[in-house]
Image (spheres, helix red, strand yellow):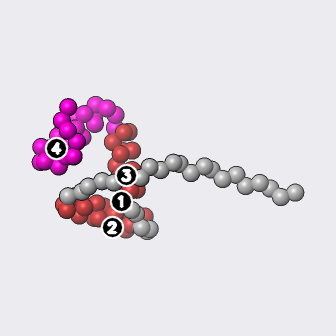
Amino acid sequence: MASIKRIAPRPAFFSRSITLTPDVEEILERFSQDAKDYTGRAVGSSAILRALVHYADQQGEQWIRSQIFPLIERELSAGVMWGKKR
């Protein structure tokens, strides 16, 4: 009798389109190259962004409020926003 291989279900992915400034694109490319040097394999921008989001989430809400939200406010103040202020 043949054994049945169980394959773990793949997580669902959502495709998002983001807009980056040239300096942020450069940073992302540098992170990608550094991650490739570290892991020995190609690392895409999506993997880097997912890792950063997971890291921020692990730090807790207080850390996000004190460290990330001010950076978001700085981005918005620089005029890089598509949404409307509430």
- Give the residues drawn in magenta, as a range: 59-86
Image spot of residue 59 (x, y percent): 34, 38
**Helix, strand or loop at mark 2:** helix
Amino acid at circle 4: Leu
Toward which corner of the image does residue 44 lie, by quadrant? Answer: bottom left
Mark 2 vs mark 1, CA separation in Å: 10 Å
Mark 2 is surrounded, within 10 Å at the Cα level, by few (under 14), some (14 to 19) or many (20 or more) other residues, namely some
Judging by the rendered image, the residue that carries numbered circle 2 is 33
Mark 3 is surrounded, within 10 Å at the Cα level, by few (under 14), some (14 to 19) or many (20 or more) other residues, namely few
Work out whether mark 2 precedes mark 3 in sequence or the reverse, and give the earlier one. Answer: 3
Judging by the rendered image, the residue that carries numbered circle 4 is 76
Mark 4 is surrounded, within 10 Å at the Cα level, by few (under 14), some (14 to 19) or many (20 or more) other residues, namely some
Judging by the rendered image, the residue that carries numbered circle 3 is 16
Work out whether mark 1 precedes mark 4 in sequence or the reverse, and give the earlier one. Answer: 1
Amino acid at circle 1: Ser
Q: Nearer the viewer, mark 2 or mark 1?
A: 1
**Helix, strand or loop at mark 4:** helix
Mark 2 vs mark 3, CA separation in Å: 22 Å
